[in-house]
Image (tube, rainbow, N blue to C red):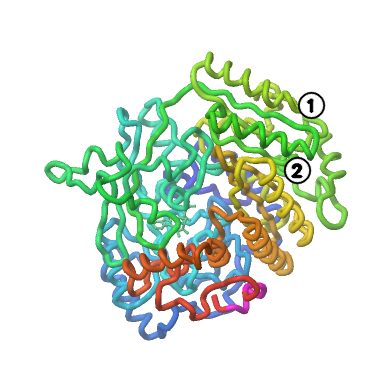
Amino acid sequence: MSKFKPIPTLASGHSGIPERLQAEAKAAKERSYSLKTLPESIPRQKPLKLPPNITQETFDVAITALEKVLIKQAVELNNKPLVDGWYMEHPNTHDAYHVIEQEEMVCSAVVYPSNASEVQSIVKWANEFKIPIYPISMGRNLGYGGAAPRVPGSVVVDLGRNMNKVLNIDEENASCMVEPGVSYFKLYEEVQKTGLPLWIDTPDLGGGSVLGNAIDRGVGYTPYGDHFANHCGMEIVLPNGELLRTGMGAIPGKDGADNPTWTCFQHAFGPSIDGIFSQSNFGIVTKMGFWLMPATEYQSYMITFPREDDFEKIVDIIRPLAVKRILGNVPQLRHAIQELAVTGKPRSHWYSGPGRVTREAIREGLKELPFGNISWVFYGTQYGDQASISSQLALIKVEFGKIPGSKFYLPSDVPADHYLHSRVQVCSGVPVLKELDWLNWKPNAAHLFFSPITPTKSKDARKIHTIIEKLHQNWGFDTFPTLCVAGREMHYIANIVYNRADPDEKSRARGLMREMISAAAKEGFGEYRTHLLFADQVAETYSWNDGALRKFNETIKDALDPNGILAPGRNGIWPRSYRDQGWELIGEKAKDVTKARL
Ligand code: ADP
């Protein structure tokens, strides 16, 4: 008998698990809790975190006023013990993967709007009381800050709980329109219910919000893997409370209907503005359209490479294949250590010595797996009819076959529990949970992503890899590189796994991040996305021409949000009233971030 209650399903709530994954989710939860030494919660050490410059008295008045603007009594104070939970039962009050003290980056309250008009009312309320609000869709942005607001004491606007409908699935246009609380799991189930031959695109894990992930410019792995590039149409509540539709949605449809071209054409007349609502704090997105992929035949595969220094050759072979669009999706290049991690077995199973897992231990560990002593693994998928898949694969095999000792595997060549089978699902738009397994690497495991962009050129890729590897060595972390190939560039995702119960490890994880950001920037590399704690430092690296980009963002911020109420500090964009007041966390100041003003 499991000691855990059944995991909430999609039938019981928007953030639940689909029935088809109930057993898998239960096993994943049990595995993660078996390595947990932290209690489920600890009594709060600090009083309720109020918004900056707001007294308890004003806060009480403001909360009463907020309750009145909502149909449902939909405000909760964040005064209960904080619970990190796990992926499927995550908090909306703080970052479950806290990399500073759990109680530092917390909200004062959470509010649950039911529609765009209530979001407008909340925004107007925030302007009246000058209280910062922080919108989340599902809050599963784990590794990048989760549901935590950048300014402690902000009121989190949890859009997902009551705004989670798939509003439309358009068969002919192969598109959909969703609200913020629609997860990949839910969208997939809804498309299945229609019986239409359409695919969604999902990231490695399926619990996140389709809308939230796209505006944070996340990626998936089918040919529609660039989520923001495959959106079409947005509805946004601006910081002054006004409602805006972008693209063709700006033309009123006939008789009050939505414009029928809203999800067909991305742009409107005049400047294309959708981009400024991604990775920003310029508006709250309440609806978003996405293109769906017509279902097709496909073939996933993996290619292994024996030597560490095959890396350069692999990258230079990938580039022309990717640029010519012979590679069908967003393929991944991973290091062999990930083959150990994705088995779900803890680090202690593979290595019990001091310091980082040694190359020798990886070699030994690989003996338990089907591929022998490998160094790199390429996971790809080809799409189309059988004839085109065969011709693409023939080309791919010839090219990678130029690397001595490389080996090509189809899913039928590997055991049923091998990770390749979960890639088959993800790369054909089926959201899964498997990717959680590597989080069992350490007890109380949490992770942070360091995500620089590198040109798909061997020299550049080697340079950033060397920086990352060396600094992981210096700070005592195993290196988990995953290179997601978009074409001319690769998202290098280095995953820092740390033990949440160990303050020293957390401090080293922060130090490692800080040093990687500045070392990479010195060589001209920048991150595509980051945990909110490091956003100021990353934003600062985009400093060309005396920080022209930052100034431009600030000009827009001040024009749209003069009271600075919407997610101050998100992506390093601070409203006027917060600038130069000690909020920015940059470089050395951040060395002891728990003492810095957050
Ligand atoms: P997911 O659960 O898909 O990972 P989150 O809800 O955590 O997504 O959102 C990721 C980040 O994007 C949040 O931290 C928040 O700052 C921003 N965000 C999410 N949803 C919205 C929205 N609807 N409007 C504006 N910003 C949003």
Whether residue 554 is situated above or below residue 170 in the rendered picture: below
Q: Which mark's residue is nearer the viewer, 1 or 2?
A: 1
Left or right position of 480 against 306 = left
Give the Cα separation between the discs numbered 1 and 2: 21 Å
Query: What is the three-letter code of the residue carrying label 1?
Result: Pro
Percent position (x, y) of residue 20?
51, 35
Residue 576 found in image quarter = bottom left
Which label was assigned to residue 337?
2
Query: What is the three-letter code of the residue carrying label 2?
Result: Ile
Say which residue appears at 49% left-offset and 66% top-offset: 547
Q: Is residue 449 visible?
A: no
Q: Within the magenta stretch, is there residue 275?
A: no
Residue bearing mark 1: 404
Quarter of the image for the C terminus: give it: bottom right
Q: Nearer the viewer, residue 28 or 349?
A: 349
The magenta segment is 590-596
Percent position (x, y) of residue 98?
60, 64
Say which residue appears at 27% left-offset and 41% top-offset: 262
Say which residue appears at 47% left-offset and 68% top-offset: 569
* Of the image marks 1 and 2, the number of the one nearer the N terminus: 2
Which label was assigned to residue 595?
none
Whether residue 148 is situated above or below residue 257 in the rendered picture: below
Residue 60 found in image quarter = bottom left
Quadrant of ligand 1: it is: bottom left
Left or right position of 248 against 206 = left
